[in-house]
Image (cartoon, rainbow, N blue to C red):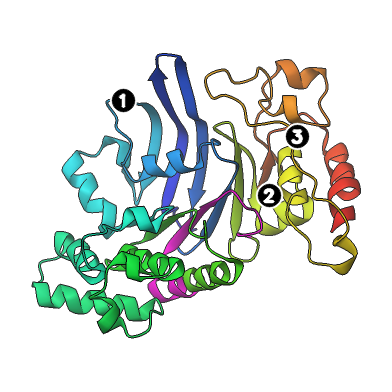
Amino acid sequence: MTDPLLEVKNLTVHFPTDDGLVKAVDGVSFSLLPGETLGVVGESGSGKSVSFLTVMGLIDRERAQVEGEIIFQGQDLLTLPADEMRTVRGEKISMIFQDPMTSLHPYYKVGDQIAEAVRVHQKVSKSEAHEQAVEMLRRVGIPRPDERADQYPHEFSGGMRQRAMIAMALSLNPDLLIADEPTTALDVTVQAQILDLLDRLKQEFNAAIVIVTHDLGVVAEHCDHIQVMYAGKIVEAGDRSDIYYGAHHPYTWGLLSSIPRLNESDTKERLVPIRGLPPSLIFVPPGCAFHPRCPHVFDRCRTEVPELLPADGHHASRCHLSLADKERIFQEEVMARS
């Protein structure tokens, strides 16, 4: 049996503030095998990005209360000294951040920024690093990479800037690539190109990938496993088919129902939004955190926190409804719209 590349155990990340304790991540556990793609889905404020910024060692431990374990290739990243973590970050784990325009330095040429990342971790000359940068730009599909390497970020389109960020992240051939909202602010055609590029590069570099997004539609064809987060917790996790064809949590049903349909019969139907707003992470509702927004709430939901329990195989959900009710409601209210 293959050992997990990444195993997160009961991770909590809390931020003390003047208003109270922000429970950004609250007891998250999951694992990822080599070569797999994991989709992490949820609204803004669900704890997705904070979870993986913690994996990257980019959370200020002096300002945050971090507990749990993050086991990567047999090492607990939370116990590594800062200099060892810097080696892991880039060489073994890389991240594509949400907005490439703010991630790329506006005063430096794109090729120089990629070359700098290479030289931080490898003992190569400037010319060798530049050659590697040009080659990476070529591999991510940027035309005339030798010319583009000498241009500035503002001279790139949004899709090309995202490709440049992917080139930088993969320049050291990491074992794990974390893509945080990689398709934000891109049009639908470019979104598809970026996701197809990640699929191709996963095979080419033999890397595991995590795609963090608020849009279940984005990960529909590109992830092996999906976990849905709400209010700092995983509320549902399973294989792609489990989530899209047999989801068990009302929040997941809401996310699925809010995906636009392109069938002619659906064009006259309104999208079904999730009512209300995500809760404050300081004053998380008692019981199930989703109960104030849930159309299927009953008394137990308001007082008792549900556990993340498996229904079958790898499919698990955090909901008090019976399995029979979950399956019935999914067929009647979600699949009926598909």
**Which is nearer the eye, 34 or 199?**
199
Identify the mark nearer the N-term, 1 or 2: 1
Residue of label 1: 63
Identify the mark nearer the N-term, 2 or 3: 3
Foreground mark, 2 or 3, reads: 3
The magenta stretch is 200-219
Q: Which mark is residue 275?
A: 3
Q: Which mark is residue 313?
A: 2
Q: Report how many numbered discs are placed on residues in the image.
A: 3
**Which is nearer the eye, 217 or 29?**
217
**Secondary structure beneath label 3:** loop
- Which residue lies at the image location 22% right of the left edge and 68% below the top edge? 109
- Which residue lies at the image location 40% right of the left edge and 59% below the top edge? 177
- Which residue lies at the image location 19% right of the left edge and 79% below the top edge? 131
- Which residue lies at the image location 39% right of the left edge and 35% below the top edge? 69
Three-letter residue code for mark 3 = Arg
Question: On the picture, is 140 further left or further right than 62?
Answer: right
Which of the 4 image quarters holds residue 71?
top left
Q: Position of residue 198 (x, y in %)?
A: 47, 69
Q: Dot 2: few (<14), some (14–19), or many (≥20) neighbours within 10 Å?
A: few
Foreground mark, 3 or 1, reads: 3
Q: Dot 3: few (<14), some (14–19), or many (≥20) neighbours within 10 Å?
A: few
Q: Position of residue 260 (x, y in %)?
A: 75, 58
Three-letter residue code for mark 2 = Gly
**Secondary structure beneath label 1:** loop
Q: Are marks 1 and 2 in contact (CB under 8 Å)?
A: no
Please, which residue is most extreme toward the front here?
Answer: 154
Whether the magenta-drawn stretch holds residue 218 is answered as yes
Three-letter residue code for mark 1 = Arg
Whether the magenta-drawn stretch holds residue 316 is answered as no
**Secondary structure beneath label 2:** loop
Which of the 4 image quarters holds residue 268?
bottom right
